Amino acid sequence: MSVIYLLISISIVVAVGFFVAFVKAVKSGQYDDDYTPSVRMLFDDELKKAKKNSKPNNNK
């Protein structure tokens, strides 16, 4: 029975550790921008085309 108490106390300590890490990440702004990553893949091709067009042409 004492093993159960030990495992429960260890699991509570681990859970509190993960909760503290989560709160620290939220306060530091880790999860602020949730829109841009979802649409970034839609604009990747346009960014690559813009980079190709902006290169100077030295072949005259």
Image (cartoon, rainbow, N blue to C red):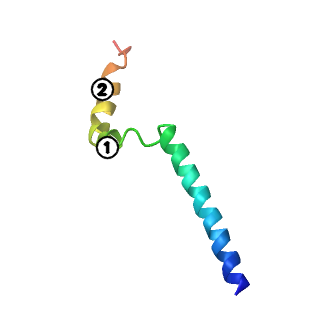
- The image shows residue 51, relative to residue 59, as above or below, that is below
Q: Is residue 5 left or right of residue 15?
A: right
Q: Is residue 49 left or right of residue 27?
A: left
Q: Mark 1 is on which residue type?
A: Met
Q: Are discs 1 and 2 less than 8 Å apart at CB?
A: no
Q: Nearer the viewer, mark 1 or mark 2?
A: 1
Q: Nearer the N terminus, badge 1 or badge 2?
A: 1
Q: Is residue 14 left or right of residue 58?
A: right
Q: Residue drawn 47% across and 37% down? A: 29
Pointer 2 local density, CA inside 10 Å: few below 14, some 14–19, many at least 20 = few
Residue under circle 2? 50
Q: Nearer the viewer, residue 59 or 6?
A: 6
Residue under circle 1? 41
Residue farthest bottom in this picture:
1
Q: For the C terminus, which image quadrant?
A: top left
Q: Residue drawn 28% across and 37% down? A: 43
Task: Classify mark 1: helix, strand or loop.
Answer: helix
Image quadrant where residue 33 sits? top left
Image quadrant where residue 10 sits? bottom right
Q: For the N terminus, which image quadrant?
A: bottom right
Could you tell me how far apart the alpha carbons at marks 1 and 2 are, in whole angstroms?
15 Å
Q: Nearer the viewer, residue 30 or 39?
A: 30
Q: Please provide percent x and percent y for residue 47.
A: 32, 31
Residue 17 has which mark? none
- The image shows residue 4, relative to residue 38, as above or below, that is below
Q: Please provide percent x and percent y for residue 37.
A: 35, 43
- The image shows residue 47, relative to residue 17, as above or below, that is above
Pointer 1 local density, CA inside 10 Å: few below 14, some 14–19, many at least 20 = few
Q: Residue drawn 27% across and 33% down? A: 46
Task: Classify mark 2: helix, strand or loop.
Answer: helix
Q: Mark 2 is on which residue type?
A: Ala
